[in-house]
Image (cartoon, rainbow, N blue to C red):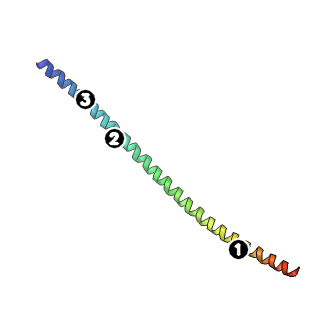
């Protein structure tokens, strides 16, 4: 009977060690994922800022395009008046 109890304790010890090893690996993985998450957050901020800059530039270019279109239409109207 003592032999069975010893075997059961050894099995239990092996299972506990497996759980401890798994938890240790998970802690390492969590630490790595936190670092990756921080990097991705910084990259996301950079992309968001770049997008804002591009949107502003796009709005500026559209305004310039509209101004040029108005000037061209005005010049075409004046040319038609001359003819």
Residue bearing the label numbered 1: 67
Residue 49 vertical placement versus 19 (above, below): below
Q: State the residue in front, 40 or 8.
A: 8
Disc with the residue nearer the chain's start (1 vs 3): 3
What label sits on residue 30 in the rendered view? Answer: none
- Distance, label 3 to label 2, CA atoms, is 18 Å
In the picture, residue 32 is in which quadrant? top left
Disc with the residue nearer the chain's start (2 vs 1): 2
Left or right, 64 with reference to 42: right
Left or right, 48 with reference to 57: left
Helix, strand or loop for disc 2: helix
Write the residue at 63% across / 65% down. 58
Helix, strand or loop for disc 1: helix
Residue bearing the label numbered 2: 27
Left or right, 77 with reference to 31: right
Horizontal and vertical percent position of residue 66? 69, 72
Q: Are marks 1 and 3 in contact (CB under 8 Å)?
A: no
Horizontal and vertical percent position of residue 13? 22, 28
Of marks 2 and 1, the one in the foreground: 1
Write the residue at 36% across / 43% down. 30
**For the C terminus, which image quadrant?**
bottom right
Helix, strand or loop for disc 3: helix
Of marks 1 and 3, the one in the foreground: 1
Horizontal and vertical percent position of residue 74? 77, 78
Left or right, 82 with reference to 34: right
In the picture, residue 77 is in which quadrant? bottom right
Residue bearing the label numbered 3: 15
Q: State the residue in front, 41 or 71.
A: 71
């Amino acid at each position: 009977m003592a032999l069975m109890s010893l075997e059961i304790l050894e099995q239990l010890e092996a299972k506990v060690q497996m759980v401890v090893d798994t938890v240790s690996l998970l802690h390492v993985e969590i630490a790595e994922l936190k670092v990756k998450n921080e990097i991705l957050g910084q990259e996301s901020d950079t992309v968001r800022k770049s997008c804002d800059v591009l949107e502003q530039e796009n709005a500026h270019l559209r305004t310039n395009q509209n101004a040029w279109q108005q000037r061209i239409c005005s010049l075409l109207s004046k040319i038609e008046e001359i003819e």
